[in-house]
């Protein structure tokens, strides 16, 4: 009887020890999984914060464009061969030819402003102006490089390298313009980075 009790006690102790060992291994596995999930959660929270920051910046930029846009007439202009430089000293050969009658979204075009457009946009020479098509909302980045002192309307002249393309483009009234080089512009940091990379 004594041996039976001892055997039963030994079996209970072994079963209890095995159960504790299994629970200990499961506990370690759960702790490892918990640590991995915590790391993933931390990484996801960091990404979410970065996305929120970028979204807030984009909302500020869109708000700035909407608040500061002014309606302009966009005309095409091919510089004559006699004049070799724009008013800002840049070479005329950098006038960008616009294909298919659409202003490019991936190039910086050279523009001249009438005094009225310059005043409405609070623009200074070499400021960056965004031209926004009213219907399609296509945006083109432009640089103010020349003046049109004889024009009284709010006109933006886009410089074409080819006179024939300039004639085909003609005159468009379906554009807004925004000066993104203003002191309060949320684009100023972006512009600095763009210019330093060029």
Image (spheres, rainbow, N blue to C red):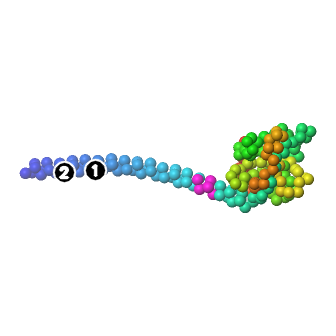
Residue closer to the observer: 171 or 90: 171
Task: Give the residue at x 86% y 54%.
Answer: 114
Residue closer to the observer: 18 or 1: 18
Q: Position of residue 24 (x, y in %)?
A: 32, 49
Task: Give the residue at x 44% y 48%.
Answer: 36
Q: Where is the C terminus found, in terms of image quarters? A: top right
**Callout 1 environment at 10 Å: few (<14), some (14 to 19), or many (20+)?**
few
Q: Position of residue 27 (x, y in %)?
A: 35, 50
Q: Which residue is mark 2?
A: 12
Counting the numbered discs, the total is: 2
Name the secondary structure under disc 2: helix
Where residue 153 sits, quadrant-wise, is bottom right
Residue 110 visible within the image: no
Q: Residue furthest left?
A: 1
Q: Which residue is mark 1?
A: 20
Task: Give the residue at x 88% y 57%.
Answer: 152
Res. 185 mark: none
Task: Give the residue at x 40% y 48%.
Answer: 32
The overriding secondary structure of the stretch rendered in magenta is: helix
Residue 107, compared with residue 172, is above or below; it is: above
Is-magenta flag for residue 59?
A: no
Marks 1 and 2, Cα distance to the nearest angstrom?
Answer: 12 Å
Q: Position of residue 161 (x, y in %)?
A: 82, 39
Residue closer to the observer: 177 or 50: 177
The magenta span reads 51-56
Asked if residue 196 lies left or right of residue 146, the reply is left
């Amino acid at each position: 009887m004594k041996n039976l009790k001892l055997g039963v006690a030994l079996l209970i102790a072994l079963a209890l020890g095995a159960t504790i060992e299994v629970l200990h291994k499961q506990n370690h596995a759960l702790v490892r999984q918990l640590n991995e999930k915590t790391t993933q959660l931390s990484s996801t929270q960091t990404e979410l914060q970065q996305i929120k920051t970028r979204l807030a910046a984009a909302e500020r930029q869109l708000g700035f464009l909407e608040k500061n846009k002014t309606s302009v007439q966009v005309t095409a202009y091919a510089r004559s061969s006699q004049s070799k430089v724009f008013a800002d000293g840049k070479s005329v050969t950098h006038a960008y030819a616009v294909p298919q009658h659409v202003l490019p979204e991936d190039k910086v075009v050279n523009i001249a402003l009438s005094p009225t457009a310059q005043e409405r946009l609070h623009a200074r020479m070499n400021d960056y102006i965004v031209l926004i098509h009213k219907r399609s909302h296509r945006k083109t980045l432009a640089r103010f490089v020349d003046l049109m002192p004889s024009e009284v309307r709010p006109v933006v002249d886009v410089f074409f390298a080819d006179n024939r393309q300039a004639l085909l483009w003609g005159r468009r009234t379906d554009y807004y313009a925004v000066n993104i080089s203003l002191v309060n512009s949320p684009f100023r940091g972006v512009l600095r980075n763009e210019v330093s990379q060029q």
